[in-house]
Amino acid sequence: MNSDIEVRRLGANEAAASIDALADVLIDCVEGGASVSFMAPLARETALAFWKHVAGSVAANERILLVAEDTQGRIVGTVQIVTAQPENQPHRADVAKMLVSRAARRQGIGARLMQAVDKHALQAGKTLLVLDTVTGGDAERLYARAGWQRAGTVPDYALMPEGGLCATAFYYRPLDPARHQP
């Protein structure tokens, strides 16, 4: 695990100021074949618009944005905790857009981001997390190692960035505040 990587939460102003760097990570991941809601080639304008929306959602306290930065302060990974949920689900959050730049993979950054997800979700009063991911991908192995439980798979749920249907696995993770001290 790379101890030179800092994982931290971005506030609204920092999120807005980081849109370009976050777009770089998203574009890199889509170019690398990640099925994360976007098709290849991903236009920079589309990536920037997505992160502008995320920054607005951070400012509205609808989501938490976490980033992993290298020693030069470059964002090499990110994940979101969508805390805005329906009235009957105040205890739950969705984990979204777990992204690590291809050059920074296999250094434990994804695991560090997921540990930070647990901490920040608990601080936000969330005790159940859910996410979805491409079936059989590297992320699925990461989530299983981190203690996430697989709820099931939906075939032909989404398209891969270059086209072609892929199955999606759904995971959940109960958080026990007594075991996960923020």
Image: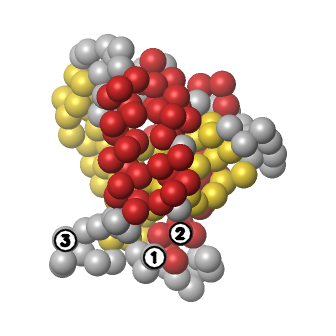
Which SS class for mark 3?
loop
Residue situated in front as seen by the camera: 20 or 29: 20
- Disc 3 packing (10 Å; few <14; some 14–19; many ≥20): few
At 19% from the left edge and 71% from the top edge, which residue is drawn?
86
- Disc 1 packing (10 Å; few <14; some 14–19; many ≥20): some
Residue 47 percent across, percent down from the top left: 38, 31
- The answer to the question of whether label 2 and label 1 lie on touching residues, with beta carbons closer than 8 A, is yes
Relative horizontal placement of residue 48, taking residue 67 as reference (left or right): left
- The earlier-in-sequence mark between 1 and 3 is 3
Residue 53 percent across, percent down from the top left: 33, 47
Q: Is residue 163 above or below residue 37?
A: above
In the image, what residue type sits under mark 1?
A: Ala
Query: In whole angstroms, how far apart are the C-alphas of marks 2 and 1?
Result: 6 Å
Relative horizontal placement of residue 39, taking residue 99 as reference (left or right): left
At 54% from the left edge and 44% from the top edge, which residue is drawn?
18
Say which residue label 3 marks.
86
Label ID, residue 120:
2
- Disc 2 packing (10 Å; few <14; some 14–19; many ≥20): some
Query: In whole angstroms, how far apart are the C-alphas of marks 2 and 3?
Result: 19 Å
